[in-house]
Image (cartoon, rainbow, N blue to C red):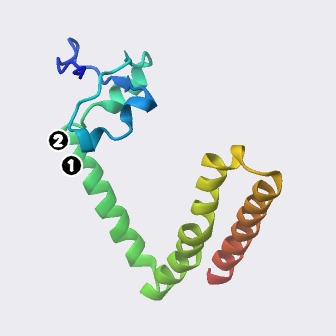
Amino acid sequence: SPRASRSPSPSGMAKVHAYMREDTRGMMSRGTTLAAVDTFAPKDETVQQSAAEPSPRLRWVLTALLLVSALLLSMFMQSILVVWSILGSTVAFLVAFILPAAFWYSLVGPRTKAWRRHAAAALLGVTAVVAVACFVLTC
């Protein structure tokens, strides 16, 4: 079986590997390794920088900002019930209806019947409106 090369990139850049779909079926059961069909590195400098690990100083700053913002927000909240109400009114709809319908629409929708695509779009629209209404009523 062909083996993928394990040599690190010379410049330490993040790389994306492409594999043949036919080669990926049943690979775990046979214990073989995949051979990359193609490899490319993003040319955009922003993408290269975002792929790198954050420095320890950046981690400290981001952690401090998150903690300070949580502290300031908690000082102005009347009750934790407000937070739970807002989270419940938005996240419940997001997890239960909006995200599954959006993922199905993007993954399966293009290859299915039109009425199913329209039903998924209607579900997305109705639940988005209801989620916004619940959010407004909570605040």
| Residue 32, numbered circle | none
How packed is label 1: few (under 14 Cα within 10 Å), some, or many (20 or more)? few
Left or right, 93 with reference to 2: right
Asked if 93 appears above or below 45 in the picture, the reply is below
Contact, CB < 8 Å: mark 1 with mark 2?
yes
Helix or strand or loop: what does disc 2 sit on?
helix
Which residue type carries mark 2? Pro
Asked if 85 appears above or below 132 in the picture, the reply is below
Most foreground residue, 122 or 57: 122
Which residue type carries mark 1? Trp
Left or right, 94 with reference to 117: left
Most foreground residue, 122 or 113: 113
| Residue with the most extreme top position | 10
Helix or strand or loop: what does disc 1 sit on?
helix
Total number of numbered discs in the rendering: 2
Give the quarter of the figure containing the C terminus.
bottom right
> Which residue lies at the image location 43% right of the left edge and 26% below the top edge?
20
> Which residue lies at the image location 33% right of the left edge and 23% below the top edge?
15
Residue carrying label 2: 56
| Residue 21: quadrant of the picture | top left
How far separated are the C-alphas under marks 1 and 2? 6 Å
How packed is label 2: few (under 14 Cα within 10 Å), some, or many (20 or more)? few
Q: Position of residue 38 (x, y in %)?
A: 39, 16
Residue 79 can be seen, yes or no? no
> Which residue lies at the image location 29% right of the left edge and 28% below the top edge?
34
Residue 16 can be seen, yes or no? yes
Q: Position of residue 84 (x, y in %)?
A: 47, 82
Asked if 22 appears above or below 113 in the picture, the reply is above
| Residue 60, numbered circle | 1
| Residue 6: quadrant of the picture | top left
